[in-house]
Image: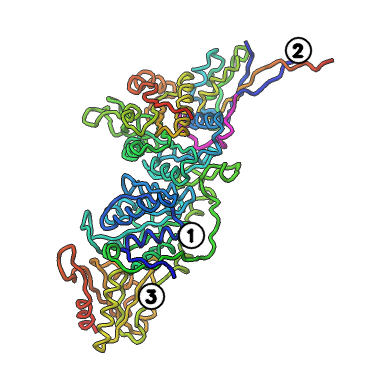
């Protein structure tokens, strides 16, 4: 029987990383994810791992860059302004094709914003917040167990594609506690990391490895022949991710004429609203994206073509709704319930199930 | 008695091809040469990993046959921290950065790597301006020096030069700081010995080590190379004296 | 005093003049009538008999363009 423990989502992220064989964390304190930083400071030294508190989140991204270049599994976690500070570093990681996991437990923004939950970094996560237009797979858990599981998947996908992967949670998910069954998930075998910089002596090599995040002027773009060839490689990688790494979960959508689309903790609220609506004879269901990039566009497009209407519920002024509208291409109605529909105007306000139920009734 | 011609000096083995093609009279390639010679003489090439910052040193590890990377502007000390800790302190890890990269955008990185006492060596090439971008004011620009962003000569309104080796002396995590000007034969030998000591202190886990090396930047100074090294003699050396400012010992 | 000789790679020399400036024996000059393929004024080894293979020119050259040789007695093969 795998070990069951009652933990917060934040801590569950930590256990997941350890199960994935990650022994290195570089990060900076920021609410509401501090329990992740503290977890690694406490646990990693016990198992021969390394915890370094960085001087800023920009530095965290740089430390990830170094550790990933040296070939180890490495993770950081952040939120709000820290996430903002990491955008340039993530663009560098994407250019240099360095695998790592970046956790963002979203909080209210913009600016310093709040220290509580929100879902306002959707676009910067899924569109690449840094310069140049890169892609990262974005996985979004909706339970403490899924935090643990998706972090392991994130490490696998990072190594599979040599690319940073984002795990996008929020303050509620991080702070709430649920039972967690700890386990090590098995994945397919991964390509060998022949490209790492650990010192030529380490691999008995005569020629060096060179990792670059720039392809300017006379700098060779090894192993590619030109900047264009390098971009071609990125494009092929991003196409492969789009084709093979879409993940979502559907909940009671068999006969649903109105389909809700929501992720993370908001999806839990919508799941309850589905049950409440069906108890009152209203057929509705939920589509919960688990990968926000690549987005489950096709399944939404098919549903729209068959006349299904949508109610997007997200804890922001409207970001996920853009992707749903894009998928639906105007073929059916896309309704929206957002952060302004919280039960309280304070930073602690939340979108609650009965408010969602009211909206279901209004639009059905 | 017949004579034989014996080769006594040539390009270091670690130097691949002819590199990035710096401007005539630039000392960045001299820093490449110094690093190669020191690593060869200390037999550390197989154990060394380097990180180059953004600027005239960005292409450093493209043409030096040791494992290396370049990275975001200013971030090299943090990248080096990541490498050093990822490999549990095993490799010799050093950065090659310019003055803007190190002391301007990278100032916080250097200060905090020093505060953490990271066992890395930071090599800062000081050419008193932003080279690759056409010669703007840098933290190391000298008072009165004309740059493209101090057209009337740097004045008090635009701040004062930063002296990192001296500044870092007071930090416990710092084991060795020094400055050399490898534009003369004596300066070249000083630079070489300071680099060796810095690497030895790193391997002896004494703490962070920092070596500043002065470089001419003829095109941006609007001088010929020979005028540039004269200017270094007259203006830079008084502002940036050579020497060891801290050495906590700790033979490797 | 050992006798030396240098070879300046004309593909690489950018005419910066550092070798000329720091050669203790003033064996090198830039005559101004020799150009590199890129159009730089080439440094030329003008006083070969004064060279003692000290290698300073090699150190000072930013282009890795100078090789330095020394003439040494070859052991005469025993009769």
Q: Which residue is mark 2?
A: B1
Q: Nearer the viewer, residue B200 or A208?
A: B200
Q: Is residue C60 left or right of residue A28?
A: right
Q: Is residue A254 visible?
A: yes
Q: Which mark is residue A161?
A: 1
Question: Hey, which quadrant is residue C56 in on the image?
Answer: top right
- What percent of the width, then of the height, locates residue A70? 48, 47
Report in which chain the residue with disc 1 lies.
A
- What percent of the width, then of the height, locates residue B35? 50, 31
Cα distance in 3D space between marks 1 and 3: 23 Å
Q: Which is more foreground, mark 3 or mark 2?
A: 3
Report in which chain the residue with disc 2 lies.
B
Label 2: how many residues lie within 10 Å, few (<14), some (14-19) or many (20+)? few
Q: Is residue B81 above or below residue A289?
A: above
Q: Which residue is mark 3?
A: A249
Q: Are marks 1 and 2 in contact (CB under 8 Å)?
A: no
For the magenta stretch, what is the residue range? Answer: B9-28
Task: Check disc 3 and report its element: helix, strand or loop.
Answer: strand
- What percent of the width, then of the height, locates residue B119? 42, 37
Which comes sooner in the sequence, label 1 or label 3? Answer: 1
Question: Hey, which quadrant is residue C5 in on the image?
Answer: top right
Q: Are marks 1 and 3 in contact (CB under 8 Å)?
A: no
Give the position of the N terminus of chain A as an image quadrant: bottom left
Q: Is residue B36 left or right of residue B99?
A: right
């Amino acid at each position: 029987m795998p070990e069951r423990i009652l933990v917060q989502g934040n801590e569950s992220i930590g256990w997941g990383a350890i199960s994935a064989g990650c022994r290195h964390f570089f990060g900076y304190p920021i609410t509401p994810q501090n329990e992740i930083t503290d977890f690694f400071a406490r646990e990693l030294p016990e198992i021969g791992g390394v915890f370094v508190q960085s001087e800023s989140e920009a530095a965290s991204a740089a430390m990830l860059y170094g550790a990933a270049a040296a070939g180890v599994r490495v993770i950081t976690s952040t939120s709000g302004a820290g996430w903002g500070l990491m955008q340039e570093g993530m663009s560098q990681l994407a250019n240099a094709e360095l695998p790592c996991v970046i956790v963002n437990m979203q909080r209210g923004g913009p600016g310093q914003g709040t220290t509580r939950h929100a879902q306002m970094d959707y676009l910067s996560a899924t569109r690449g917040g840094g310069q140049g237009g890169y892609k990262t797979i974005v996985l979004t858990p909706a339970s403490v167990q899924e935090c643990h599981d998706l972090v392991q998947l994130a490490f696998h996908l990072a190594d599979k594609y040599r690319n940073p992967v984002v795990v996008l949670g929020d303050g509620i998910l991080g702070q709430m506690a649920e039972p967690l069954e700890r386990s090590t998930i098995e994945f397919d075998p991964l390509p060998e990391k022949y490209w790492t910089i650990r010192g030529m002596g380490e691999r008995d090599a005569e020629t060096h490895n060179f990792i670059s995040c720039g392809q300017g002027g006379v700098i060779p773009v090894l192993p590619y022949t030109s900047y264009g060839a390098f971009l071609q490689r990125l494009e092929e990688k991003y196409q492969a991710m789009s084709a093979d790494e879409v993940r979502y979960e559907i909940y009671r959508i068999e006969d649903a004429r109105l389909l809700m689309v929501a992720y993370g903790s908001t999806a839990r609220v919508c799941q309850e609203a589905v049950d409440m609506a069906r108890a009152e004879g209203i057929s509705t269901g939920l589509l919960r994206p688990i990968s926000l990039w690549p987005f489950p566009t096709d399944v939404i497009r098919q549903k729209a073509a068959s006349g299904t209407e949508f109610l997007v519920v997200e804890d922001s002024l409207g970001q996920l709704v853009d992707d749903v509208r894009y998928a639906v291409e105007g073929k059916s109605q896309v309704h929206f319930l957002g952060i302004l529909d919280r039960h309280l105007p304070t930073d602690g306000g939340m979108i609650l199930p009965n408010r969602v139920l009211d909206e279901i009734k209004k639009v059905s | 008695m017949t004579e034989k011609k014996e080769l006594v000096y040539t390009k270091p083995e670690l130097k691949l091809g002819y590199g990035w093609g710096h401007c005539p009279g630039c000392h960045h390639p001299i820093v490449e040469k110094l690093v190669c010679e020191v690593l060869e003489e200390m037999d550390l090439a197989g154990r060394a990993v380097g990180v180059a910052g953004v600027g005239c040193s960005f292409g450093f590890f493209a043409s030096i046959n040791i494992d290396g990377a370049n990275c975001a502007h200013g971030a090299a000390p943090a990248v080096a921290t990541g490498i050093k800790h990822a490999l549990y302190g095993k490799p010799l890890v050093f950065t090659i950065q310019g003055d803007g990269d190190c002391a301007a955008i990278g100032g916080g990185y250097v200060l905090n790597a020093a505060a953490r006492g990271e066992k890395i060596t930071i090599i800062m090439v000081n050419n008193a301006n932003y080279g690759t971008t056409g010669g703007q004011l840098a933290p190391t620009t000298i008072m009165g020096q004309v740059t493209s962003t101090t057209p009337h000569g740097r004045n008090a309104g635009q701040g004062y030069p930063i002296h990192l080796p001296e500044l870092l002396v007071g930090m416990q995590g710092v084991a060795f700081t020094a400055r050399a000007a490898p534009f003369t034969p004596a300066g070249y030998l000083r630079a070489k010995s300071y680099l060796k000591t810095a690497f030895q202190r790193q391997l002896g886990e004494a703490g962070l080590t920092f070596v500043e090396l002065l470089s001419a930047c003829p095109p941006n100074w609007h001088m010929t190379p020979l005028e540039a090294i004269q200017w270094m003699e007259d203006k830079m050396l008084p502002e940036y004296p050579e020497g060891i400012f801290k050495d906590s010992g700790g033979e490797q | 005093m050992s006798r030396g000789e240098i070879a300046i790679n004309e593909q690489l020399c950018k005419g910066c003049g550092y070798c000329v400036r720091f050669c203790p024996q003033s064996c090198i000059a830039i005559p101004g009538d020799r150009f590199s393929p890129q159009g730089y004024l080439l440094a030329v080894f003008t006083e070969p008999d004064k060279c003692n293979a000290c290698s300073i020119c090699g150190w000072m050259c930013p282009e890795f363009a100078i090789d330095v040789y020394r003439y040494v007695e070859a052991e005469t093969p025993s009769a």
